[in-house]
């Protein structure tokens, strides 16, 4: 640790400022990378939700038709037993 202190101590003010800037820039780039990756994950999830919504919309019509047909058969069966 003392060698790092001596090394930094021997730098000129301009180089110390450049070192501070580079370390700060590294942290900003790292955090930006994490945030960008998180946004891409959210975008991919939204795309999957849209695909699922379209699928459900198409299947809902077919499911309603099947339920309606089954209900009709149940009602016809009940009427046949009553007669």
Image (cartoon, grey):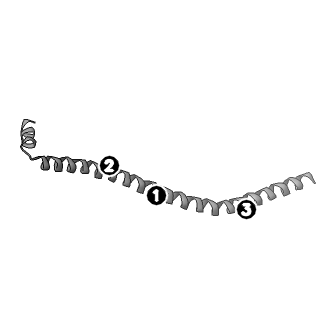
Residue depth check, mark 1 versus mark 2: number of the one nearer the observer: 2
User: Which picture quadrant has residue 55?
Assistant: bottom right
The residue that appears at 59% across and 62% down in the rendered structure is 54
Residue 43: which numbered mark, if any? 1
Q: Considering depth in this image, is 46 or 82 the residue closer to the camera? A: 46
User: Which picture quadrant has residue 71?
Assistant: bottom right
- Left or right side of 72 for 21: left
Q: Which residue is mark 3?
A: 65
When the figure is inspected, residue 1 is found, relative to residue 65, above or below; the finding is above
- Left or right side of 15 for 81: right
Distance, label 3 to label 1, CA atoms, is 34 Å
Residue depth check, mark 2 versus mark 3: number of the one nearer the observer: 2
When the figure is inspected, residue 25 is found, relative to residue 50, above or below; the finding is above
Q: Considering depth in this image, is 21 or 76 the residue closer to the camera? A: 21
Task: Check disc 1: other Cα within 10 Å, few if <14, some if 14-19, many if 20+.
Answer: few
Distance, label 1 to label 2, CA atoms, is 19 Å
Distance, label 2 to label 3, CA atoms, is 51 Å
Quarter holding the C terminus?
Answer: bottom right
Q: Earlier in the sequence, mark 3 or mark 1?
A: 1
Residue extending furthest right?
Answer: 83
**Is the residue under label 2 in contact with that under label 1 (CB below 8 Å)?**
no
**Is the residue under label 3 in contact with that under label 2 (CB below 8 Å)?**
no
Q: Secondary structure at mark 3?
A: helix
Q: Which residue is mark 2?
A: 31
From the top left corner, tell me how far across and down residue 13 is, in percent: 12, 46
């Amino acid at each position: 640790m003392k060698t790092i202190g001596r090394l930094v101590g021997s730098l000129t003010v301009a180089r110390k400022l450049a070192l501070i800037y580079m370390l700060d820039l590294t942290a900003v780039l790292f955090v930006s990378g994490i945030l960008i990756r998180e946004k891409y994950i959210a975008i991919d999830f939204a795309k999957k939700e849209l695909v699922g919504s379209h699928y459900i919309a198409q299947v809902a019509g077919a499911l309603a038709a099947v339920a309606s047909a089954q209900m009709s058969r149940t009602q016809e069966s009940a009427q046949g037993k009553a007669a």
